[in-house]
Amino acid sequence: MKRTERVGAMIQILTQSPNKTYSLQYFCDMFGAAKSSISEDIRACNAALEFTDTGRLETGVGAKGGVKFVPYISDEQLSQLQSEFCCKLSDPSRMLGGNFLYTSDIFFDPDFIRRIAAVFVRKFKDCGADYVATVETKGIPLATNVAHLLNLPLVIIRREAKVSEGSTVSINYFSGSYDRIQRMSMSKRAIEPESKVLVIDDFMRGGGSISGISEIIGEFNGTVVGVGVAISGLEPKKKKIDNYTALVFLGEIDEENKKITVLPNNDIF
Amino acid sequence: MKRTERVGAMIQILTQSPNKTYSLQYFCDMFGAAKSSISEDIRACNAALEFTDTGRLETGVGAKGGVKFVPYISDEQLSQLQSEFCCKLSDPSRMLGGNFLYTSDIFFDPDFIRRIAAVFVRKFKDCGADYVATVETKGIPLATNVAHLLNLPLVIIRREAKVSEGSTVSINYFSGSYDRIQRMSMSKRAIEPESKVLVIDDFMRGGGSISGISEIIGEFNGTVVGVGVAISGLEPKKKKIDNYTALVFLGEIDEENKKITVLPNNDIF
């Protein structure tokens, strides 16, 4: 097998399962090659990945040292993503009245959410999370992508306890967006006690729903180690949670003049 | 830039956005290379991908002919996946009573659902779908993966009409699993009229929920062009829909003897 083909195959295997560690021996056995050749191949893989700026290979040290693909988004790609996002969101045809915007097309566009996910992966790759959690429904595809890129299991918190979830823990919380008490519910089997959880959601206004997630995770003696939301409302300024990373900020929705203000977060990293 | 690095970069770009067509010119410009070199690189990419058996590049003909990555799962990888799936599902600790099984850990495992998604991609890649649709909640991560691998927008049908969906179309249907009338609701903006839709779900018992999806798609003059479910119950034998592809069949859940019968579908392709 030619080096070119070997490098191509390694890139495909490694990038298909991001953040999953493969031992060098795995590739030695696969290609019938010596460790020195595989090490050289890894350098070639990295040169190729550097060119696309979508991630890099990280190699561990010692006898157990393996190699894994860590996704990345460059500052330039991030700016491009944010300006596309602002442009999409400020389209006045999204206005639904009552300060609501239609955003499902954005959050259900596989390519676009994959790029948003890459931002959260760059931000939270070292936060030590054991799980990626979200509350149904609109943020699930985004959280699915983050979980895949971080190689972590996903947790979906439900609005209602379902038979298929077995025993559940439920809490009530106040949602500012809907101006009423809401309920969320999580299966007792969903996470191990004392886990670290990265919370991902599509939209945050006052933070009620995210602080609800924190509370329910607390019921499992778990800790929220990071919060990433694609869109955060500028108002109310005082949120129910302090630490979160938003990709863009949604300002005023001026229905009379058909104008939606959206600003990029220039302070993500 | 060396050929090895160029081939690696091309594989990363193409496999990151499956079923998205890139013109040869795109790569010529990116690498400052002639079309003849890029064509040779594509052959090298294909040789590398052939080795991993995870997909291949398809090139179009004519002036507009480009190249795209089409994911694939081999018969051998499929058998392996099905036996892992059967083994996971038949674990008696999943029993929740009332013929329900806990399966969230399976459907929220990013790597595992990506492999299931590849089966539906191989099955439905030529079905002509414009969208991938599912009904909330547990099948969403799987449907997200299928949508990404087919490069199609996702549609999530809700249980309740939400303010953030704008105007919706709702229907009622009978759910055999829950033995009651249920409701589902879809935003009027979710699909274009007369679209073709591929339906993906985690589990089907009598087919009530899938036939509900068909009905609601019908309200948009759309057509269901394929149905893929990860698990189908063996009972009832007579489903409300005729054409569907299941990965595995769930037989008897014998609570007394702690035995769950699960069989692979040997007739997918």
Image: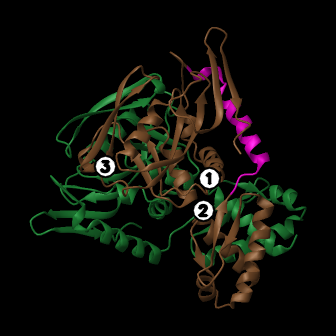
Chain colours: A green, B brown
Figure quadrant of the N terminus of chain B: bottom right
Give the camera-side residue of B31 and B59.
B59
Q: Which image quadrant is residue B252 in? A: top right
Distance from disc 3 to disc 2, alpha carbons, whole Å, reads 37 Å
Give the camera-side residue of B220 and A125.
B220
| Disc 3 and disc 1 on one polypeptide chain | yes
Q: Which image quadrant is residue B170 in? A: top left
Residue B9: tell me if it is visible: yes
Figure quadrant of the C terminus of chain B: top right
**Badge 1 density bin: few <14, some 14–19, many ≥20, Cα 10 Å:** many
Question: Mark 1 = which residue?
Answer: B121
Residue A129: tell me if it is visible: no
- Range shown magenta: B72-95
Residue A217 on the magenta span: no
On screen, A171 above or below A65? Answer: above
> Would you say B18 lies left or right of A28 here?
left
Q: Secondary structure at mark 1?
A: helix
x 76%, y 41%: residue: B80
Q: Name, please, the residue furthest toward the top.
A: B256
The amino acid at mark 3 is Ser
Q: Nearer the viewer, mark 3 or mark 2?
A: 3
x 42%, y 67%: residue: A269
On screen, A254 above or below B221? Answer: below
Question: Mark 3 = which residue?
Answer: B187
Residue B83 on the magenta span: yes
In the rendered image, residue A55, in percent from the top left (x then y), is placed at 59, 68
Q: Main secondary structure of the magenta part?
A: helix
Question: Mark 2 = which residue?
Answer: A70
**Badge 3 density bin: few <14, some 14–19, many ≥20, Cα 10 Å:** many
x 41%, y 76%: residue: A80
The amino acid at mark 1 is Val
